Image: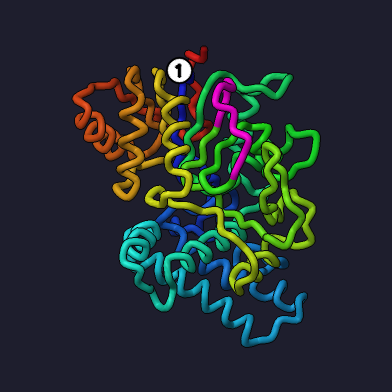
Amino acid sequence: MSRVAYILGAGASYGERIYDKDGNVVRFSRGLPVVNEIAYALKLLQQGGERKGAIFLQEEAKKQNVALNVYENVRHMLSILERACTSYPTIDTLAKQLFVTGGLFEGLNYGDLKRYLSTALLMMQDEKKRDLRYDGFIAALIDKQRKFPNMTILSWNYDVQFEMAYSGYFTKERYIPSLWRELNVFNKKYPTDFRINDPFAMIKLNGTALFTDSSLEKWSVNGESVNRITDCFYGGNKYTPYQYGYEYLNGGNYENLLSYAWEEDNMNALRKNIGLRTFDTRELIVIGYSFPYVNNELDTFIIGNMSKLDKIVIQDKNFEDIKERLEGILASFRRTVKIVPKSSLQQFYIPNRFV
């Protein structure tokens, strides 16, 4: 069904950085932090160094007349998340540990950790500061009917960078589930009218770092009434990402839509759709994804399902490490596939063989 498939990881939303004279990052000017930068990005978020004049912890708290003790509690929550990011190889490593053991990290359980992380990621995103490589990728592939070539994107990212870039082509309500409907997205944690036979599809393997609110007007998906997402970017709701973030961190009737690979949410449907979309993939393009061990089970299923695969393109500065991981997965199926690097990271690689 898709002769060409993509796997996107955090590096696909890397964007741009501003550095000081010593080569240290002082600001994330576009896109989002990768795993080893999240702790520093959280520090900026707490200090207000990222967006002077629109500081979540200070300015938004003042606007809402938030009591000092409540404000300090929110700051404390983000500081715990910051320490969690520096205490483990990756934040996903800690998440897996809490999931398996039911344990705590400084009072945070598994659900808390996901909520804090989703909220922080939400506040770090800005449509005007998105990774512009998504824009270039979409512009190169989309036609005048807003259609894409026959391809499937498997995204491990739970951000909305692709959606932000695509929203400029959407002429109706720019509500994120509307964008998903138009893009033909399967979201692990949120129901969509996914059309398996459409030429183009995107499958969000970890869900999305957004929230639903049971108190909002319902949203219709295939005639089914489902909770509406609190879409602070395009949904016409009254809050900014910062204001929503304040509420998410203090509870409320919100459901987190982030779902890691080891969670069973819609796993049968996820695997089925991956299988049907990618069984005849010939060329796989991997952008900014390192095939971490915590995702090994699903990654092995994805690669194993591509029985006709003859070429893998890796667009990442760590080509050799990623190649070694892929060769290990392929060896488990006793298969050899040509693996080639794409050294330039300025734009997403686009292959010549779309069918």
Q: Residue at x 44, y 34 (%)?
A: 7
Count of marks placed on residues: 1
Magenta highlight range: 191-201
Q: Nearer the viewer, residue 39 or 105?
A: 105
Please provide percent x and percent y for residue 260: 43, 51
Please say whether residue 241 is one of the residues in the magenta stretch: no
Please provide percent x and percent y for residue 354: 51, 15
Q: Nearer the viewer, residue 79 or 298?
A: 298
**Is residue 112 something one can see in this rendering?**
yes
Q: Main secondary structure of the magenta part?
A: loop
Please provide percent x and percent y for residue 206: 47, 47
Give the vertical position of 160 relative to 197 (above or below).
below
Quadrant of the image occupied by residue 181 = top right
| Amino acid type assigned to the residue bearing label 1 in the image | Arg
Q: Nearer the viewer, residue 187 or 80?
A: 187
Residue under pointer 1: 3
The secondary element bearing badge 1 is classed as: loop
**Is residue 11 something one can see in this rendering?**
no
Q: Residue at x 65, y 27 (%)?
A: 139
| Residue 277 left/right relative to 213 | left
Please say whether residue 197 is one of the residues in the magenta stretch: yes
Q: Residue at x 57, y 62 (%)?
A: 119
| Residue 221 left/right relative to 19 | right
Please provide percent x and percent y for residue 244: 68, 64
Q: Residue at x 33, y 30 (%)?
A: 303
Mark 1 Cα within 10 Å, few/some/many (few <14, many 20+)?
A: many
